[in-house]
């Protein structure tokens, strides 16, 4: 007869942080900024949300260039 391990509680896994994905809070804030840029004129909230998400994903996935510091001191 084989011995079996006693059933143990499964380890709690933390949700993985997905790289290059904005949070819901970031998307909501960007969507609000889109609404403000429209001078508070009602629009389509879903379109604002999708545009905000698309812009943020693009921003996160586009590699940043290192800025070149130029000294103007003589």
Image (tube, rainbow, N blue to C red):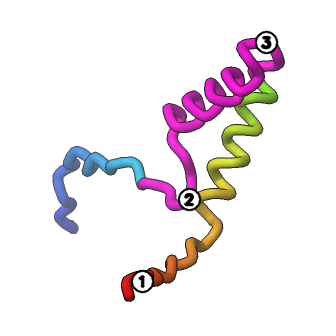
Residue 7 location (% of width, % of height): 22, 48
* Element under disc 2: loop
Would you say 14 lies left or right of 37 here?
A: left
Bounds of the magenta span? 17-45
Q: Is residue 15 left or right of residue 63?
A: left
Task: Indicate the position of residue 49 as horizontal and vertical percent values.
Answer: 71, 31
Q: Which badge, 3 or 2, is on the more N-terminal residue? A: 2
Viewer-nearest residue: 51 or 23: 51
Residue in the picture at 62% in, 65% down: 61
Q: Residue 30 at x, y = what percent? A: 61, 34
Query: Which residue carries the number 1 mark?
Result: 71
Q: Quadrant of residue 52?
A: top right
In magenta segment, residue 20: yes
Q: Tell me the distance, in whole angstroms, between the alpha carbons under discs 1 and 2.
A: 34 Å
In front of the other: label 3 or label 2? 3
Answer above or below: position of 2 versus 7.
Answer: below
Q: Residue at x 51, y 60 (%)?
A: 19
Whole-percent x, y for residue 11 in the image: 25, 51
Res. 20 mark = 2
In this view, 55 is above or below 5: above
Residue 47 left/right relative to 62: right
SS assignment at label 3: loop
Quote the CA–CA distance across marks 3 and 2.
31 Å
Q: Nearer the viewer, residue 51 or 2?
A: 51
Label 1–label 3 contact, CB within 8 A? no
Q: Which residue is mark 3?
A: 41
């Amino acid at each position: 007869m084989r011995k079996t391990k006693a059933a143990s509680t499964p380890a709690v896994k933390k949700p993985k942080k997905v790289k290059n994905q904005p949070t819901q809070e970031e998307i909501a804030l960007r969507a609000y900024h889109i609404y403000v840029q429209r001078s508070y004129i009602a629009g389509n909230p879903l379109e604002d949300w999708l545009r905000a998400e698309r812009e943020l994903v693009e921003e996160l996935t586009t590699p940043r260039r290192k800025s070149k510091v130029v000294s103007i001191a003589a």
